[in-house]
């Protein structure tokens, strides 16, 4: 089920109402049923994949806790192989077959037929979330969950099951067990976040999407300036899309008294790539930090090993997003830029210089432009498409210059979003609104509803991160 | 605590209603027209401008206004009907790939008591098949359909923004089509070996029974035959076919609005279907034709049976199945409509 659908507008209030009407000990059944329904709206048979993940990690957790020595590692391996195996089959199998066919298969006369595999929505998210549980049990930081219902809800919890935030069991699992009495503040806060999230997704992301699409479909038709504008539009679109989704997810969970982690902190105000990744998709960044980067030695190694670790980390992160070379390049470029900035900052005096207020504006702009450029590989359908965009961006001759087709009024919600983001910097929309007088609060609701009604994109787009 | 929540809830509902009303006013004044154009639903405005000047409205798809390169007369079927009923004004609403679902929403917008007396609606046999019902063209058509619904404009806009229409991708539609072809039984004689579209098409594609003089397979002819089987090789199930439901509803709406109804059952290339795909296909087409004529005649609708009226050579496309006719074909259809439904093709009350 999409958050930006009529179904969800009915589904959420009904689930929240039932949640508070039910006795706390029965709520896990409601959440489980609601989450299954939420997921099955997309493609019912794939709920079995989620059940498989639940079963593998539930029993792995119990067995790891009971075992000692090599057996613990063995059961952890079972969990890793189970999760990564499912992920590999559904997401990466065809990529490897295609790569084999392209690189070696034809030469040695051994090619494989590629069969279409429908990617389960959000598979990368719930496998990573579930995997973090077994790793924490293995490390001894987390007690294994005995109640399979609560564990299933941890993997399936509908507000964040398909696109995060990727929560740890310590945080979400334990909250699912708690009794949450009805509190008006929770409903109010949740509502504010859902409303703001819908505004960001429907009025900003969905209005920018057609601008981006027309340029990426036919880059040869557009001038360098139009292509540049489309790249900036995509930077805003993907942020608004994912940030909007996360905000709705946090709001929906909050209505039931459950706190999800913040996934974004104004990433385009970052002054360097490192800073960007501390503000963008925080739950994924911290997952990779804790379960990939630190086990590899992190930054407490020699320089060459550190460089290697960073490049591996970012490349894997790129590959996590999609089984395409474009994503690998996207991740690797982030890694390379990260290292370049790291070494530039080592030059004596540079660090002090970057702390100047004027420098921060310049560095912020530089980071935004770099990230915007690298998004080309994230958005492009394939390498040829990415090359077409880059070629178009830097071409001097203009064979054609088709004007960008968009309605000027879409800038109204984009501008409003920009103003709001500047206003709520270092805070969150609900907290920012909470500190206003009653009139301002209700006026803000009215403005957001008015904008959603009047300025939302006329076409509904799936959340970009759903396909990961 | 609970009282406070209820009070705030009521305040919020009032705010929501007020903001929606205000947004609707602003939307209609500045944005609605552009959205209707973008959703390709301009027939809504055309209907508004027609209902006080037209006695008869002809509603159809591309068959009405597709012309052959050799045509010397570029008149629509509806315009050819107009020529033959000078006493009444015939207006046209047509749009490529449109079908009964869209006609239905459009007809609901006709104001009771308007000048319109009769509706001539094209009934395209192909639109009852799985391939058309699940075509990717449905996405833009259903988007336009949202705009034809009789909700306040701002609500229609929200329905579009929330994707409240059939917007399945081809990846989602293809398996549905395959399932229909595989599972829907054909009403064929017991001795005919292929009981489903899938079996029939598979056999026809693989058997290579059409050969060229040099002994190689005649791929063009095989493709044409398979095209025929996929598109017209079905038996209408009146209980589950969505198009039947749409036409049934059209009949009800027309009765409510006191409108005469004429279904113009469009010609299919039965001649080629018989010779290229086989007599069983021609038989299926005739069975479906008989079913539709009988069903809707019984409901007081005049069904103009054009199925076999146009000879194969008068179809514009000679290598694929369409309902596009050259000028003679269009003239034949128009004349048959006037001959069969003449009593309805008048001004209201005459």
Image (cartoon, coloured by chain):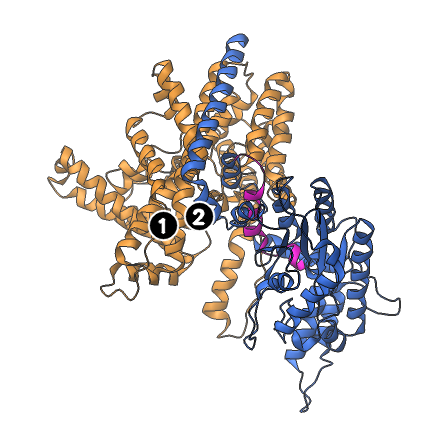
Chain colours: A orange, B blue
Label 2 – label 1 distance at C-alpha: 9 Å
Please say if the residues under marks 2 and 1 sit with CB atoms less than 8 Å apart: yes
Query: What residue range appears in magenta?
Result: B131-152
**Labels 2 and 1: the sequence-earlier one:** 2
Circle 2 SS class: helix
Please provide percent x and percent y for residue A325.
Answer: 41, 57
Furthest residue in direction bottom, as rendered: B214
Location of residue A372 with respect to B73 vertically, above or below = above
Instruction: Please determine whether, in this image, residue A394 is positioned above or below residue A192.
Output: below
List the residue tagged with mark 2.
A321
The 10 Å Cα crowd at callout 1, few under 14, some 14 to 19, many 20 or more, is: many
- Residue of label 1: A331
Answer whether residue A196 is visible to the viewer in this image: no
Which chain contains the residue that carries disc 2?
Answer: A
Residue A395 within the segment the image draws in magenta: no
Which residue occupies the extreme left position in the image? Answer: A349
* Residue located at (83% from left, 62% from top): B187
Q: What SS does tag 1 mark?
A: helix
């Amino acid at each position: 089920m999409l958050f930006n659908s009529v179904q969800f507008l009915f589904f959420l209030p009904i689930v929240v109402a039932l949640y508070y009407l039910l006795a706390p000990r029965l709520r896990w059944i409601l959440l489980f049923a609601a989450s299954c329904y939420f997921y099955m709206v997309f493609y019912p048979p794939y709920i079995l994949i989620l059940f498989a993940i639940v079963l593998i990690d539930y029993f792995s957790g119990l067995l790891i806790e009971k075992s000692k020595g090599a057996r613990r590692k063995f059961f952890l391996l079972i969990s890793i192989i189970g999760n990564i195996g499912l992920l590999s089959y559904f997401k990466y199998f065809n990529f490897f077959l295609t790569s084999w066919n392209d690189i070696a298969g034809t030469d040695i006369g051994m090619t494989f037929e590629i069969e279409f595999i429908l990617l389960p929505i959000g598979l990368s998210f719930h496998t990573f979330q579930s995997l973090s549980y077994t790793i924490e049990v293995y490390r001894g930081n987390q007690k294994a969950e005995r109640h399979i219902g609560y564990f299933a809800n941890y993997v399936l919890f509908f507000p964040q099951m398909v696109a995060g935030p990727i929560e740890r069991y310590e945080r979400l699992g334990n909250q699912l067990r708690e009794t949450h009495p009805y509190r008006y503040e929770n409903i109010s806060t949740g509502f504010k976040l859902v409303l703001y999230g819908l505004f960001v997704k429907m009025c900003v992301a969905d209005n920018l999407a057609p601008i981006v699409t027309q340029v990426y479909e036919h880059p040869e038709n557009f001038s360098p300036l139009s292509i540049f504008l489309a790249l900036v539009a995509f930077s805003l679109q993907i942020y608004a899309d994912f940030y909007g989704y996360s905000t709705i997810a946090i709001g929906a969970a909050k209505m039931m008294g459950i706190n999800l982690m913040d996934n974004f902190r104004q990433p385009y105000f970052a002054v360097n790539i490192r800073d960007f990744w501390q503000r963008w998709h925080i739950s994924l960044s911290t997952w990779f930090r804790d379960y990939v980067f630190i086990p590899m030695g992190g930054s407490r190694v020699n320089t060459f090993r550190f460089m290697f670790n960073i490049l591996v980390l970012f490349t894997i992160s790129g590959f996590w997003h999609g089984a395409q070379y474009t994503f690998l390049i996207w991740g690797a470029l982030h890694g390379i830029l990260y290292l370049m900035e790291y070494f530039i900052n080592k030059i004596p005096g540079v660090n002090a210089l970057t702390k100047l207020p004027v420098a921060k504006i310049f560095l912020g702009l530089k980071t935004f432009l770099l990230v915007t450029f690298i998004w080309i590989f994230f958005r492009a359908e394939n390498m040829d498409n990415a090359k077409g965009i880059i070629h178009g961006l830097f071409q001097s001759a203009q064979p054609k210059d088709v004007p960008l087709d968009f309605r000027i009024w879409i800038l109204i919600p984009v501008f409003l979003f920009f103003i709001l983001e500047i206003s709520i910097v270092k805070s969150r929309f609900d907290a920012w609104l909470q500190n206003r007088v009653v009139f301002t609060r209700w006026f803000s609701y009215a403005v957001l509803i008015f904008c959603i009604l009047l300025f939302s994109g006329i076409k509904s787009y799936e959340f970009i991160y759903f396909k990961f | 605590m609970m009282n406070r929540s209820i009070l705030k809830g009521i305040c919020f509902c009032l705010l929501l209603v007020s903001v929606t009303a205000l947004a609707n006013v602003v939307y209609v004044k500045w944005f609605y027209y552009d959205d209707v154009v973008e959703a390709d639903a301009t027939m809504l405005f055309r209907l508004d401008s027609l209902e006080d000047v037209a006695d008869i409205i002809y509603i159809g798809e591309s068959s009405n206004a597709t012309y052959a390169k050799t045509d010397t007369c570029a008149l629509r079927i509806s315009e050819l009907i107009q020529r033959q009923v000078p006493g009444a004004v015939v207006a046209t609403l047509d749009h490529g790939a449109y079908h009964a679902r869209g006609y239905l929403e459009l007809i609901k917008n006709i104001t009771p008591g308007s000048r319109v007396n009769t509706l001539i609606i094209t009934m395209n046999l192909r639109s009852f098949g799985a391939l058309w019902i699940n075509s990717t063209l449905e996405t833009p058509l259903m988007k336009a359909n949202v705009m034809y619904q009789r909700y306040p404009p701002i609500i229609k806009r929200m329905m579009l923004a929330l994707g409240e229409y059939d917007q399945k991708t081809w990846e989602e539609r293809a398996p549905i089509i395959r399932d229909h072809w595989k599972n829907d039984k054909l009403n064929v004689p017991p001795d005919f070996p292929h009981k489903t579209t899938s079996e029939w098409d598979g056999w026809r594609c693989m058997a290579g029974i059409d050969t060229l003089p040099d002994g190689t397979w005649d791929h063009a002819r095989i493709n044409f035959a398979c095209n025929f089987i996929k598109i017209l090789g079905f038996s209408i199930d009146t209980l589950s076919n969505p198009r039947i439901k749409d036409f049934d509803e059209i009949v009800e709406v027309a009765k409510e609005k006191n409108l005469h109804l004429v279904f113009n059952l469009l010609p299919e290339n039965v001649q080629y279907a018989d010779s290229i795909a086989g007599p069983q296909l021609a038989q299926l087409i005739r069975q479906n034709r008989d079913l539709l004529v009988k069903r809707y005649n019984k409901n007081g609708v005049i069904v103009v049976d054009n199925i076999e009226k146009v000879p194969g050579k008068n179809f514009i496309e000679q290598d694929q199945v369409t309902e596009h006719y050259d000028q003679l074909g269009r003239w034949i259809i128009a004349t048959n409509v006037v001959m069969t439904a003449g009593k309805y093709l008048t001004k209201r009350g005459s």
